[in-house]
Amino acid sequence: MAKTVVGLFDTIDEAQQVVQDLADNGFERSDISLVASDAKGKYASSGKSAGTNADEAGHGAAEAAGTGAVGGTVVGGALGLLAGLGAIVIPGIGPVIAAGTLATALGSTALGAGIGAGVGAAAGGLIGALTNAGVPEEDATLYNEGVRRGGTLVMVRAQDDMAQEASDIMTRNGAVNIDERGADYRQTKFDSTSQPYSTEQMDTYRQQQVRPAATATNTNVNTNVNRTNMTEGDAVLPVVEEELQVGKRQVQGGGVRVYTHVTEKPIQEQVTLHEETVNVERRPVNRAVTDADMAAFKEGAIEVTTTSEEAVVSKQARVVEEVVVDKQATERTQTVQDTVRRTDVEVEKINPGMTASTTTTTTGTTTGQTMGFTDYDSDFRTHFQGLGQSGYTYEQYTPIYRYGYDLSNDPRYTGKDWSAVESSARQDFETRNPNSKWEQFKDSVRYAFDHGRKGMGNAANSVDNARRSM
């Protein structure tokens, strides 16, 4: 028993890949049909630019089919070898390219015939062609609307044992879920007087069908801190940190429909029949009469009947094969990458003898100032560029350098070198950043730590020199 598998695709590139996969998997090209919207005149052009509205585009497609020209992007691909590939104008849909049995049903002109574009009005247009192929009228109406909105329809006739494979090929190549789209399609009442979609309407509709990629939820908080001279009370500086929240949602994928058809084929069987016949023969004789002859010498009648056999034909349906259509559920792990931000509060000690201080002596004026984090910005940028971390930006790495710089100003580590600080620093870093690898960032942390220590030492030396000069 043959089955018809139908799939609708948003782009002709997806449909072309389906045709190629079907051919690669043993499906005859003569069993594959296709109808694709060509409102832009991209695949059928006569050397003129196609019009921008539906009427002009249809006129351009009609002229193109008259010359047997179909764009090389299609002819050179998987569609180029389909039977009867040509241009056609369908009332209510506009210009399309069609191939296979659907092209024949729509009355399209085969590529190269040079007869002119067919007009698919006979037998109900595309809806009639699909219903004649065994597709229920309700589904045929939905597929018709899908092509009208710029989609591409692929249909293949397959034997029972290959129908599921055809369905799988269409599904993995992006066949749309006709039930999901149907809610929108059913709002449109289609007939032969309907106006075709313009190219702008098609582009807008396609953009609406693109599912937005899932994005992480970020909370942006701007905290403005003004420096003031505190005389009493407390100043509260909030430390704001973003958290990455990754969830999941269920989305409905595409699908295909499989239709069952009953086909007939002639069968011949031989049977031996028994048949009887009666033969009557007259023979001339001349002999003496016997007693038996005298006994038969009277009126009477004999009857001889014959029997014969005739063929009796009966049909009995038997189940010879089962086609199981099912779906399998699998799970996959997806890694979501994003960045989160954190407000870090920088604390600088203000020492009249060290920071921004001026001492007047008999020999002159000496100024000593502590180096701040921003003073090392150019050094940190140079160091970052030498790391070759192509997956990060310097702004993403800034918190790492800030962490190392803060360690150099931490009273717990005063007078300690890096070897004594690293173990504690690593534990604190991994507690704050459980998903980050210490080994990846420790060189940057140490670089900032050493620079912070160096800045403090330079400031201390400046102060000592000033004191000795007093």
Image (cartoon, rainbow, N blue to C red):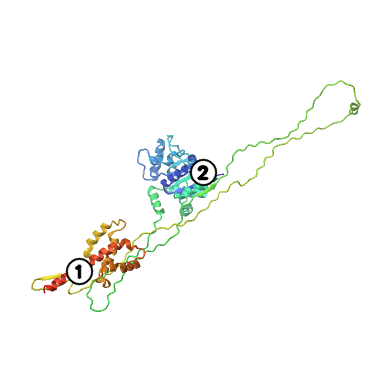
Numbered disc 2: secondary structure: strand
Graded by Cα atoms within 10 Å as few (under 14), some (14 to 19) or many (20 or more), the crowding at tag 1 reads some
Residue at the (24%, 79%) spot, across then down: 232
- Between 143 and 55, the one lying in front of the other is 143
Location of residue 391 in the rendering, given as x and y in whole percent from the top left corner: 32, 57
Question: Quick check: marks 1 and 2 in contact, CB under 8 Å?
Answer: no
Say if 325 sits above or below 408 in the image: above
Location of residue 441 in the rendering, given as x and y in whole percent from the top left corner: 30, 62
Outermost residue on the top side: it is: 286
Quadrant where the N terminus is found in the figure: top right
Outermost residue on the left side: it is: 362
Question: Label 1, label 2: how many angstroms apart (C-alpha)?
Answer: 84 Å
Say if 62 sits above or below 430 in the image: above
Q: Mark 1 points at which residue?
A: 457
Location of residue 318 in the rendering, given as x and y in whole percent from the top left corner: 63, 46
- Between 178 and 269, the one lying in front of the other is 269
Q: Name the residue under label 2.
A: 157
Asked which quadrant contains residue 409, the reply is bottom left
323 sits to left or right of 252: right
Location of residue 130 in the rendering, given as x and y in whole percent from the top left corner: 50, 45
Q: Which amino acid does label 1 sit on?
A: Gly
